Amino acid sequence: MRKDSDFLGEVEISNDVYYGVQTLRAIQNFNISGTTHYEMNEYIQSIALIKKAAALANYDSKALNKEITQAICEACDEIIEGKHSSSFPIDVIQGGGGTSSNMNVNEVVACRANEILTGTKSYSKIHPNTHVNMGQSTNDVIPSAMKIATYKNLEQLLIPLEILEKTLIDRQKKYENILRLGRTCIQDALPMTFGQYFSGYVSFVQRMQKKVKNLLEECLELPLGATAIGTSLSVQPGYLNNVYKYLQSESKIEFKKEENFFDGLQNADLYIEVSATLKRIATTLSKIATDFRILSSGPKAGFQELNLPAVQPGSSIMPGKVNPVIPELVNQLAYQVCGNDMTISMAVEGGELDLNVWEPIIIKNLSESFRLLNNGIRIFSEKCIANLTPNKKISTKYASDTLALSTTISAIFGYKTGTLVARKAFNEEKTIKEVVLELELLSKEETEEVLDPFNMTNEQISSNMILKYQKIYNKVEC
């Protein structure tokens, strides 16, 4: 055991860990959610990156000597590499605007740096506040680390989005010539192809990729150097320029100083936009998942248009029942991301005066949303979309038999005639083709062309075809 103290008194700490008294008090005070920094590597590693850049900047200002600087940098590098994760046991939800998180890293870096220099865990040569936290405040470190972590999480999110895009494009191309019946209000509408159907999903994913890339730019401006309230009190001469120079060189990312430090500390509105983007992705994925659940419903009394991969039995009492468990997983993912978004919105709005102290709950929920989407998109792509198949026989029949084929009759002969054809087909349980021939509106060959579902899926073919028959029959109603 070793001893550490603060103004509240002295405590004993195990020699097995690198943290100190402030971390220990945080463990005792904030054991609430079960989510600790151990599970948020990007966040802790971002704080460690800041500590390293600050040490190098303070060395350039001659505020730290070479020996101390090198030891701090080595300790930070170890954290950035993922080492010492057990020394970050604090609950992410905490009072104090993230002070416990900042001090947890300060203590671990200082203790490990001392161990590097002296062989023992202590603060004999390097102190958490005096040396590791030099020229910094929790108030500029935490919002800066949040932006760095968010940048890295956004970068990571692009990977599963690209996987999803490629998977959907594969389905789009493979089934581009298979018909399906479009539906609006869950009622029969016009024919389309599965290629067109999947193209809408592809377009959505591509739009979200662009949105995520745009958000990366907004994460580059940091309030590091603002210190406590934005006035930069306690920084060394030259520190502001040098700390960003080292952030860039160490991260290979072009982080830069925020134009207005007061804005950077007072407002956390960036996370409204980031979270909203995650919600957009999650809710639309959920919509896609619901589409798959509807179109795969059955197998005897549902839509039966899509066959989803069977990944596990679906009932403890009904043999042979297979549920769409992967789409259902995606639905629930979206519900959680929406809940996280509400929490983030409230925390951003709740900022007071010169600092938003609710950033711990923001980063906790944002990190969870990123994690859910990273995992969920991969699972959805690999375990569901990659191997789903259309039921060609059923989907083609639905597309060929729909009453909505009367839309082309309406376009050629007028809405009244189109309605007459549709009503007669419905009441007499006949196809639109049969009624058109029975009423002698078109010849057999003309009927085949006009009511060909594939012709209706092509804008150029359908518009030219309708114009041709309008001219032939010249019966468009006024």
Image (cartoon, grey):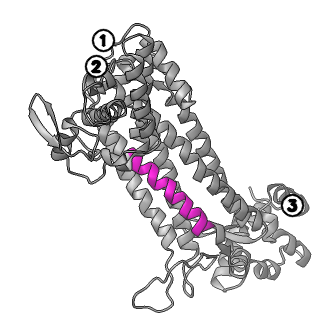
What residue type is disc 2 on?
Ala
* Looking at the image, residue 93 lies above or below residue 286: above
Q: Quadrant of the C terminus?
A: bottom right
* Labels 1 and 2 touching (C-beta < 8 A): yes
Camera-nearest residue between 42 and 443: 42
Q: Quadrant of residue 50?
A: top left
Cα distance in 3D space between marks 3 and 2: 71 Å
The residue furthest top is: 237
- Magenta stretch: residue 472 in it? no
Q: Which residue is mark 2?
A: 228
Q: Which residues are magenta?
A: 366-385
Cα distance in 3D space between marks 1 and 3: 75 Å
What residue type is disc 1 on?
Leu
Q: Which residue is mark 1?
A: 233
What residue type is disc 3 on?
Met
Q: Which residue is mark 3?
A: 465
Q: Is residue 193 in sight in this rendering?
A: no
Observer-side mark, 3 or 2, equals 2
- Residue at disc 1, secondary structure: loop
- Residue at disc 3, secondary structure: helix
Q: Earlier in the sequence, mark 1 or mark 2?
A: 2
Cα distance in 3D space between marks 1 and 2: 7 Å
Quick check: 244 left or right of 87? right
Q: Residues within 10 Å of mark 2 (few under 14, many from 20)?
A: some
Please give the name of the residue rendered at 54% of the width and 47% of the height, measured from the top-left corner: 157
Q: Quadrant of residue 443?
A: bottom right
